[in-house]
Image (cartoon, rainbow, N blue to C red):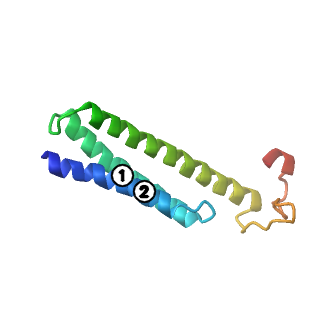
Amino acid sequence: MTEAPASVHLDRARSGIREALAAWNAADLSRVEKCCQLLSTAVGDLRVFESAVLSGEVPASDDLCSTLTAVKQEVVEATRVVDACVAFHRGLAARTGGAPPVYNAEGCIAEESDGLESEVHA
């Protein structure tokens, strides 16, 4: 792999991260899942590029290492947000018995599944 095609992977990884963040909507689980897929693809592209750097196919420089570190950090931060949101949706589904949540005027879930205590799950 030459430097030009390897850099395509880096550009695609960065583009995937931007696309994931642009599509982000924590209230829409399907969009959360799309973001997760985009981030997974970005990680794959980043790994291909990093392999090219490690093998010497792409010359390593301080700027390149800084860029790789910054992109990795973007992925880590975005992935944490996605993971937290998915966990929230899973917990919400468990709490409501899989039914869509209904909120009361205080912003709390109006109806909980039988046997769940609000103070434990709040």
Q: Are marks 2 and 1 in contact (CB under 8 Å)?
A: yes
Position of 98 with respect to 106 (left or right) is left
Q: Secondary structure at mark 1?
A: helix
* Residue placed under numbered mark 1 in the picture: 14
Mark 2 residue element = helix
Query: Which image quadrant is residue 75 in?
Result: top left
Q: Is residue 97 left or right of residue 45?
A: right
- Indicate the quadrant where residue 97 lies: bottom right
Give the x, y percent position of residue 87: 62, 50
Residue 41 location in percent, x, y?
36, 54
Q: Closest to the observer: 103 or 71?
A: 71
Q: Residues within 10 Å of mark 2 (few under 14, many from 20)?
A: some
| Residue at horizontal 34 percent and vertical 52 percent from the top | 13
34 to the left or right of 71: right
Q: Residue at x 61, y 53 (%)?
A: 85
Residue 18: which numbered mark, if any?
2
Query: Which amino acid, by three-letter code, is at mark 2?
Result: Arg
Q: Residue at position x 30%, y 34% from top?
A: 65
Say which of 30 and 114 sits in front: 30
The amino acid at mark 1 is Arg
